[in-house]
Image (tube, rainbow, N blue to C red):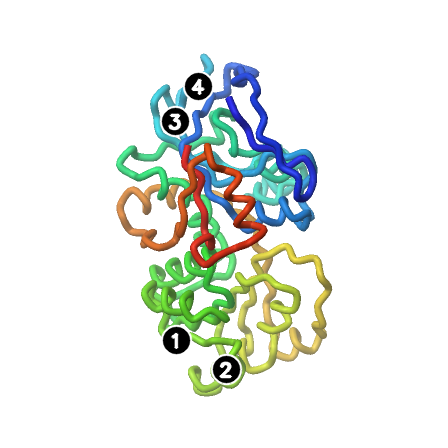
Amino acid sequence: MKEVVVVEPHKVEIREVPVPELKNEDEVLIQMKAAGVCGSDQHIYHGKNPNSSYPRIPGHENAGIIAKVGKNVTNVKVGDHVIVDLLSSCGTCYQCTHGRKNVCGHVRVRGSGADGGWREYFTAPAKEVYKISDSVSWEDAALVEPYAIGFHCTARGRVEPDDVVFILGTGTIGSIILQTCRAKGVKKIICCDIDDASLARAKEYGADEVINSRTQNVVERVKEITKGCGVTVAFDSACFPGSLAMCLQPGIICNAGRMVPMGFCTDFEHISQAMINMREIDIIGSRMSQNAFEPTIQRMEAGELHTEGIATMCIPFAEVEKVFAYMDHPVPESKKMVIMF
């Protein structure tokens, strides 16, 4: 079989290796069918992911078919279509025993701290795979993981119907957060980006108002839209140096509001205690997802998710070099790539 290895930043090898064998009777062998390309995969390639090590096989948005099962496996069988969880947790630490396995003290994340799915076959513990109906296309199946992030981060942000939501960045995750907030029936959603095409797509997904931060004053527009009240919860899915401080500017988030940053940008930002405490803002971290795969799969199977337009480019695995070419030289169509096996 073939696998993709980022040997070090900006150095990629396509290797031929044996198909892996099951290490124990609790594992399954997965034949890959589709893998989403995430911003964190780009950060691994560019050497900017603080959670990654090298050499590394990227890929945490993985969908495939069960090719082999161990004798102890009961939740799936050969031929089942499955989604693979991106994390392995210890199950015994404080975080795991308090419902926070996504930040387990010993967590290993596929495609980052452990090898991921950009290869034709790989093994995983059966408890880390979830069956999905074969009526769901492989392209959509690869989107389950980012939709699970939307499910998780809006739960972390305690999104309720009476909320007014601000979303900075209308790429893949921002669009999914938007859809999730819309499904929760929030009062109003304001999306902000520098790209008019992305903002137009956000309107199609249900945004009530859009702001182009390149041509408009964000604080003044938020004040205008909310009649000076500000928003109750803000999501930073743009995640550039300074984006967190931008969202925390007075006038955007109201008193007692919540701020949910989504990225791993390591640059320090100019944030004062007064920016937080004068309004008593909750800043809520969100990483990956927790118990979100199965409800997300159910929504995907029921056709409740607006997936059209989320994946902007499908690339055959035989041409996977194009993925890295677009990482170096992105075009609008490469905003969300999916590798098809």
Is residue 221 shown above or below 154?
Answer: below
Labels 1 & 2 near each other (Cβ < 8 A): no
Q: Residue at x 35, y 30 (%)?
A: 81
Residue hosting label 2: 216
Measuring from the top left, give residue 304's x and y in whole percent: 29, 51
Nearest to N terminus: mark 1 or mark 4: 4
Nearest to N terminus: mark 1 or mark 3: 3
Measuring from the top left, give residue 184's x and y in whole percent: 36, 61
Element assignment for label 1? strand
- The amino acid type, in three-letter code, at marker 1 is Glu
Is residue 28 shown above or below 136?
Answer: above
Q: Which mark is residue 65?
A: 3
CA separation, marks 1 and 4?
Answer: 49 Å
Q: Is residue 83 left or right of residue 101?
A: left
Q: Which mark is residue 209?
A: 1
CA separation, marks 1 and 2?
Answer: 13 Å
Residue hosting label 4: 73
Nearest to N terminus: mark 3 or mark 2: 3
Of the two numbered discs 3 and 4 in the rendering, the one whose residue sits closer to the viewer: 3
CA separation, marks 1 and 3?
Answer: 41 Å
Q: Residues within 10 Å of mark 2 (few under 14, many from 20)?
A: few
Q: Is residue 306 left or right of residue 257?
A: left
Q: Residues within 10 Å of mark 1 (few under 14, many from 20)?
A: some
| Residue 33 quadrant | top left
- The amino acid type, in three-letter code, at marker 2 is Gln
- The amino acid type, in three-letter code, at marker 3 is Ile
Q: Residue at x 45, y 55 (%)?
A: 172
Of the two numbered discs 3 and 2 in the rendering, the one whose residue sits closer to the viewer: 2
Labels 1 & 4 near each other (Cβ < 8 A): no
- The amino acid type, in three-letter code, at marker 4 is Val
Element assignment for label 3? strand
CA separation, marks 3 and 4?
Answer: 15 Å
